[in-house]
Image (spheres, coloured by chain):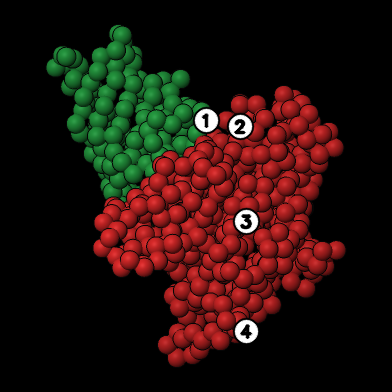
Amino acid sequence: MVNEITRREIEEFVYREAALLDERKYEEWLSLLAEDFYYWMPAGRADTDPNKDLSITYDNRNELAQRVARLLHPAAHCQVPVSRTSHLITNIRIEELDDPCLKVYSNFAVFESRSGNQRVFGGHCEHKLRRDHETWRINYKKVNLVNSDGVFNNLTFLF
Amino acid sequence: MLALTNGLTALGPDELIKDERVHRLVYTDTAIFQEEMRRIFGRVWVFVGHESQVPYPGDYRTTNIGGQPILMSRDSDGNVYVMYNRCMHRGAIVCREESGNSKYFRCIYHGWTYASDGTLSGVPFRNGYPDDFDFGSLGLMRLPRVSIYRGFVFASLSSEGETLEDYLGPVTQYMDKIVDHAPEGEIEVRCGVSKYEYFGNWKLQAENFMDHYHAPFTHESIFVQRLGSQEGYKSWALNQKVRDGVEHRAFEHGHSVMDHPNWTRRHREPPSEYMAALQTGRGRDRAAQVMEGDIHIYVFPNLLFQESSQSYRVIRPVAVDRTEVFDYPYRLKGAPESYNDERVRGVSRWASATGTGQPDDLEAFSRVQEGLRAVGPEWVIFARGWDQEKFGSLGERISAKGTDETPMRGLYRYWKRLMAHRGSEP
């Protein structure tokens, strides 16, 4: 069982990550990511192999940096106007791995409003974190939408 | 005779489709949409799925044709059957899952059971029916015509019409090119699917896929990134030679092909391991042939191929202003694992709902659908290259320039024929 201080730190970290995504502060968000970071949103069942099966998103850190840069371009029509989001993170459970790593399991809901339409998405999230001095870095973030096998319109904001 | 009303006027296909423009009602009228489901999706050869999606006896997939529930399955006799996913008792769908494997289909309502080829194999309390009741005709109803080309399963809801090969015509040679990228001459569709939807008419996706005019504008943001700078993008985007260096052919039955003839594998050398396998498997000449150029194919009404992406898309109309598209990457049998892996991931990168390309197209589609609510401006214009088309040796129309709208005019020529049809068939 992880101690109270670490638990508080992890929660603050995950909430701060969510806030950066809501505020579209992508540069700052990228600075939270480890060099070998990957971001994975499986399509269909969660046990697909992201190297062999199609995922909704499967990016390494470089690819993610390119992705967010392109979303900020004024002619990225899928984000004109931008999606306004609110990430809710809850049900946080922490699993200690070999120091300095741990896993964070959480449930999430994202409210998104764009062009007068509001949508809600939800699912389960898995972060692997590694302590880096006073803070944490994200090794990977896996986002399992409850409707990962669904049909989606524009999903170009970040979960 | 097709008669439609938009309140006051009735317009038939002759009034809706002109040589170089199309009436907005074709995209917005719910009565026309219902007629399309009947006269187009209910009549011609419609793509259902790929054989490799049901490789083993008992494998099945569900889909729809014009909104009607369809079941494709592989029986123990080795054949693929395409049937209505509909219990012959009281009409419930017998299968809810997208895909799976089962020795039988059992309706959850009253337990009627069917084999993989649709044969009725079980009726609980059968003695409740009259002694002479004809159960023999109550297997899952098979679609009247099913035909397979290079593993692509097509079906028709109509019992009459030309063969699949006649319907596809010269498009078969382009489909051959697609499949012959596989050293073993077969593709495998088993690596997931990107499912997206947009709030627009189904024909917008078909038009867009064969459109070489839109890319610099719709996809500006990703091309600026790829080309490194806004200036780099501009010199490419406004380079008419690049835009026009593509050839369109519009065939009978609404199909079309867009080819980048000078585009050798996107200017990259294919990996030597793959080329060696391809040369061994297909022969050196054929290997060289398939590696030349890069094609998009539209197989009317619902199938789109993108050669260099190693994927195909299926258009699924839901409503006049709502469409689903399922994009299937596939693996080439006999190609190195890593070659296939890279291609699968590329499909996700461009064409998933989070993709770097497709979502911008979807934004365009929803803007078109919204704009077409305006009744005053009646016409959608497809005049690019209209007066410049040449006829090819197979009777196809060939564009003069890459930004010409030859494929769209071809789609609507066939659309008009189908919607004006006065035969006894629906």
Specify the label residue A52 is tagged with. Answer: 1
Quarter holding the C terminus of chain A is top left
Residue B48 location in percent, x, y? 54, 54
Residue B47 locus on image (x, y percent): 57, 56
The chain in red = B
**As displayed, is residue B26 above or below residue A10?**
below
The residue sitting at the front extreme is B131
What residue sits right under mark 4 in the picture? B14
- In the picture shown, does residue B290 fall above or below B201? above
Residue assigned mark 2: B340
> Image point 38% across, 36% down: which residue?
A45
**Residue farthest along the top direction in this orientation:** A99
Q: Identify the residue position indicated by label 3 in the image.
A: B147
Give residue A150's position: percent from left, percent from top: 38, 47
- Secondary structure at numbered mark 3: strand
Amino acid at pointer 3: Ser
- Marks 4/2: CA–CA distance: 47 Å
**Picture quadrant where residue A88 is located:** top left
Looking at the image, tell me whether mark 2 or mark 3 is earlier in sequence order: 3
Chain to which the residue tagged by mark 3 belongs: B
Q: Is mark 1 in CB contact (under 8 Å) with mark 2?
A: yes
Q: Secondary structure at mark 2?
A: helix
Vertical comparison of B417 with A25: above or below: below
Task: Identify the mark nearer the N-term, 4 or 2.
Answer: 4
Q: Nearer the viewer, mark 2 or mark 3?
A: 3
Query: In the image shown, does A37 or B171 lie closer to the viewer?
Result: B171
For the residue carrying disc 1, how many other residues have a C-alpha within 10 Å: few (<14), some (14-19), or many (20+)? some
Nearer the viewer's eye, disc 1 or disc 3?
3
